[in-house]
Image: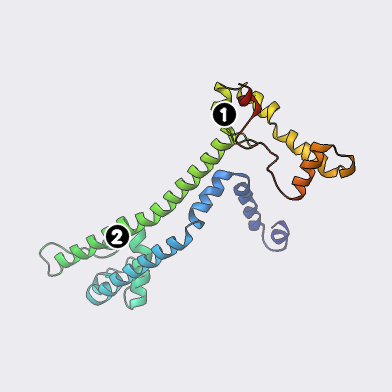
Amino acid sequence: MSIIAIATTPLVYSILLLDIVKRSDDLQNIIKSITHNITQLIKAVVLGLIVMYFYAIIGFTAYEMFFNSDGESPNIDCRTLLHCWTSVINYGVRSDGIGEIMDQVAMGETKYWSRWIFDLSFYVLVIIILLNIIFGIIIDTFGDLRDTRNEELKKVEQTCFICGLDKYDFDTRGNGWFEHIYKEHNIYAYLNFCIYIEKRDITECNGIEKYVKEMIEKKDISFIPQGEALALQNE
């Protein structure tokens, strides 16, 4: 990015600020909340575009005269169906409803009630329902990712990596949680032992070391205590 910025424009340097996303798990979950269910989001957006296309057709055929009749907003245009659709998508969603971008109809005029139904139904279907469906997918995905991360952190903090037993068992029946994870089942002690066995020639190994070395070569971890600990057995 720095090389591109030097060769083109310094504005590219701003992209480097996104490095904070790589350093933060919370920000990564925010990005994943959008990308994780991207298929559902795309389908919801397509459904919204189809619904707004229906409203663009109705607006083009029945209410074209209400789009920018005063000339104050030249970008709001319904002279063609395409222009009407883009106006509904752009300004209808951003203006909290299609009725906000069209001229109002006084009560008693010919198309008052049809416009009333047209404006209100667009607000309910698009602004309230479809947009909240999209937001709901993103929020629910973020909540699921957050819960999954919290469960993983809880498992790391309250479950022994070696034997898989809970912190509660060692606090109530054993020698204590910290005594267990730092002395009895110290993960780094197991790692150091595995590295030591892997580098040691099999002819120099004793019976236990030879057995562990053969298990490591077979990628078999049955030699690691799973679901049991001497501290609890002794107790």
Q: Position of residue 190 (x, y in %)?
A: 73, 36
Q: Position of residue 210 (x, y in %)?
A: 81, 41
Amino acid carrying mark 2 in the image = Gly
Estimate how packed mark 1 is, as few (under 14), some (14 to 19) or many (20 or more) residues with alpha carbons within 10 Å: some
Is disc 1 placed on a helix, strand or loop?
helix
Report the disc number at residue 109.
none
Image quarter in which the C terminus is found = top right
Amino acid carrying mark 1 in the image = Lys
Image quarter in which the N terminus is found = bottom right
Left of 176 or right of it: where is 117?
left
Left of 43 or right of it: where is 166?
right
User: Measured along the vertical axis of the image, is residue 195 above or below residue 132?
Assistant: above
Q: Tell me what residue is drawn at x 35 percent, y 60 percent.
A: 93
Determine which residue is flagged by label 2.
Answer: 97
Determine which residue is flagged by label 1.
Answer: 167
**Observer-nearest residue: 56 or 75?**
56
Res 131 visible: yes
How many labels were placed on the picture? Answer: 2
Instruction: Please tell me which of labels 1 and 2 falls first in the chain.
Output: 2
User: Measured along the vertical axis of the image, is residue 40 above or below residue 205?
Assistant: below
Q: Tell me what residue is drawn at x 66 percent, y 54 percent.
A: 13
Q: Position of residue 175 (x, y in %)?
A: 63, 21
Q: Tell me what residue is drawn at x 22 percent, y 60 percent.
A: 120
**Observer-nearest residue: 104 or 154?**
154
Disc 1 to disc 2, C-alpha distance:
55 Å
User: Measured along the vertical axis of the image, is residue 68 above or below residue 160?
Assistant: below
Q: Position of residue 26 (x, y in %)?
A: 54, 44
